[in-house]
Image (spheres, helix red, strand yellow):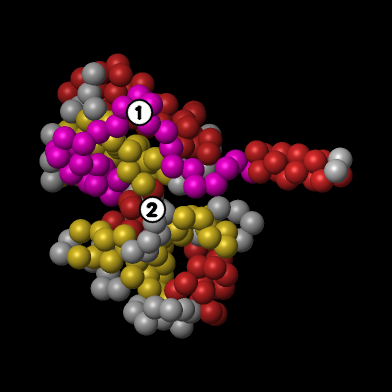
Amino acid sequence: MIVLSIDSSSSVATCALLRDDCLLSEYVINNKREHSVLIMNIVEMLLKDNNIDIDEVDGFVISKGPGSFTGLRIGMATIKGLSFGTSKPYIGVSSLDALAYSSINFDGIICPIMDALRDSVYTCLYKNENGTLNPLIDYCALDLEELVSLLKEKSEKILFTGDGLIKYKSYLQEHLPNALFAPNHLSLVRASSLGELGLKLLLEGKYDDVNSSPLYLKKPLAERELEKRMALKNENNL
């Protein structure tokens, strides 16, 4: 089975092409250029370099989030278009799952953190059980202090990964003596990890439909600010 996977949930644009248990190619661009400009160009280069036509792809995998609202919409629209155009299935996989999967052999708790702005992160907790990621909590958005308070209850080693390390590594080191940190190349959402997880689901006959939407966890900032202003206005009118 040939699978094409895409992630655009963060500042990274990444695509991978997999055939069964083999990673054929993976492109990772981490320079904050617009994903709307990059994604289809990367897909075309990926297919061309592997001498594979889009119609030969058996399924598609996309990061469903959480992450950048704009990036998620661009990635989802791209994969839905490819899926519809080729009549091949697609499946959405969490960006947090993909981050954790890159460090699946860690013997302890794996904690991916993605920057959610304003000292908060998108996160989940995982354990490796016989080669399978076992989530210990639901996907969530937490203030950094809330996350630290939650993890202080754990006696195990904790491996942090994800772009949240850029901002919060020092804080985590200071407050969690049992914290460890994944290397930089594993702290990016990798389309290869996303693709492996999605390929397993597609082989099980699982797929999404055209009505599937991204996993946001938080409302867009502009929407939250509007709700605050409206609530304040209603209070003043009482």
View extreme (front): residue: 238
Label annotation for residue 61: none
Q: Is residue 96 visible?
A: yes
Residue 89 % position (x, y):
24, 27
Residue at left 29%, top 23%?
A: 83
Residue pictured at 47% horizontal, 72% vertical: 150
Instruction: Provide the residue designation for mark 2.
Output: 96
Q: Quadrant of the N terminus?
A: top left
Query: Is residue 105 placed above or below 200 in the rendered structure?
Result: below
Q: Residue at x 42, y 33 (%)?
A: 213
Type of residue at label 1? Ile
Front residue of 81 and 144:
144
SS assignment at label 1: helix
Q: CA distance from mark 2 to mark 1?
A: 19 Å
**Does residue 209 appear to the left or right of 163 in the view shown?**
left
In the image, residue 83 sits, relative to residue 175, either above or below, namely above
Report the span colored magenta. Answer: 193-221
Q: Which of the labelled discs sits on residue 79, or is there none?
A: 1
Q: Secondary structure at mark 2?
A: helix
Residue 157 percent coordinates (x, y): 35, 78
Q: Residues within 10 Å of mark 1 (few under 14, many from 20)?
A: many
- Tell me the amino acid under the disc marked 2: Leu
Residue 61's image quarter?
Answer: top left
